Amino acid sequence: MKRIVYAVVAMLAVSCGEDREFDAQGTFEATEVVVSSEAVGKILEFNIEEGHNVKSGMLLGAIDSIQLHLQRKQLFAQQSALLASRPDVKKQVSSFREQIAKQKKELLRVENMLSEGAATKKQYDDIEAQIRVLESQLEATLSTLSKNTSTINDNSAAIEVQIAALDDRISKCQIVSPVNGTVLVKYTEVGELASIGKPLIKIADLENIYLRAYFTSSQLSKIKLGDTVKVVADFGGDERYDYEGRVSWISSESEFTPKTIQTKDSRANLVYAVKIAVKNDGRLKIGLAGEVIL
């Protein structure tokens, strides 16, 4: 995929007295993200200041999480005790298996004696009945132990979910930048109490800035997404610099012309907002006035 390279012209446009024609006017904006607290507690670390550049995933600070760690430790102890209470099925049924094996040997002995006339049929039937009773008891015991083990395992799994939920809450005690950008505003300081949803900082991507300009309906036929246009940043006085911009978004709905905007057609009341992406060379600032020349 071919990428559009934003080349900064960075040259003086015109002198103060020269009247320059433009097709649309607007102001420079940037994608702003307000980072809010996802946890409740005292802010222990927050070593970031306005103007600092941050990267996505960068750790910016930390909120007190000692109580969450203690709860996590308690849950681990409960889970350990619960798992230790699981029955040893093999040991608890071993006596039944031994008795059954002994009775089967006795049954075989009595069967041999019966064939020789040295034992009665009643002796054989009694041993056979005892084996059936023991096997029934073994089956019932196995069923009970299996249910107990299953219940304990289910309770352990429930504790595991609680531990995972605590891990998530603990991770949210870390203040992390979600995007690359520059810190515009810092709303809180170390020692203050954070609450869920409380704004902490505002970050803006100042490298990829855009001009929000307004075009009349008659001008829309001259522009389309991906078009390259000339953007003029007005710093006041003679400070005007040209940049190459790319049309990245065109509004599908019209709106009334903002009072601060002068369109080429002064009689136009309804205009369409257009975003024009510009690669920032460090000079462009949010709120700076700009003009578009098609």
Image: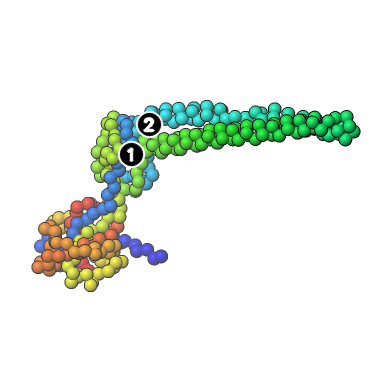
- The image position of residue 82, as x and y in percent, is 52, 29
**Quadrant of the image occupied by residue 221:** bottom left
* Residues at marks 1 and 2, CA–CA distance in whole angstroms: 12 Å
What label does residue 65 carry, if any? 2
Nearer to the camera, 155 or 44: 155
Q: Let me know if residue 168 appears in the view.
A: yes
The amino acid on which the numbered mark 1 sits, given as a three-letter code, is Glu
Q: Is residue 78 left or right of residue 201?
A: right
The residue depicted at 62 percent of the width and 30 percent of the height is 88
Nearer to the camera, 220 or 16: 220
> Is residue 207 placed above or below 137 in the rendered structure?
below
> Is residue 33 placed above or below 67 in the rendered structure?
below
Q: Secondary structure at mark 2?
A: loop
The residue depicted at 73 percent of the width and 30 percent of the height is 130
Nearer to the camera, 35 or 140: 140
Q: Let me know if residue 243 appears in the view.
A: no
**Quadrant of the image occupied by residue 44:** top left
The residue depicted at 27 percent of the width and 62 percent of the height is 249
Quadrant containing the C terminus in the rendered view: bottom left
Nearer to the camera, 176 or 251: 251
Q: Are marks 1 and 2 in contact (CB under 8 Å)?
A: no
Q: Mark 1 or mark 2, which has the lower sequence index?
A: 1
**Mark 1 = which residue?**
38
- The image position of residue 81, as x and y in percent, is 52, 27
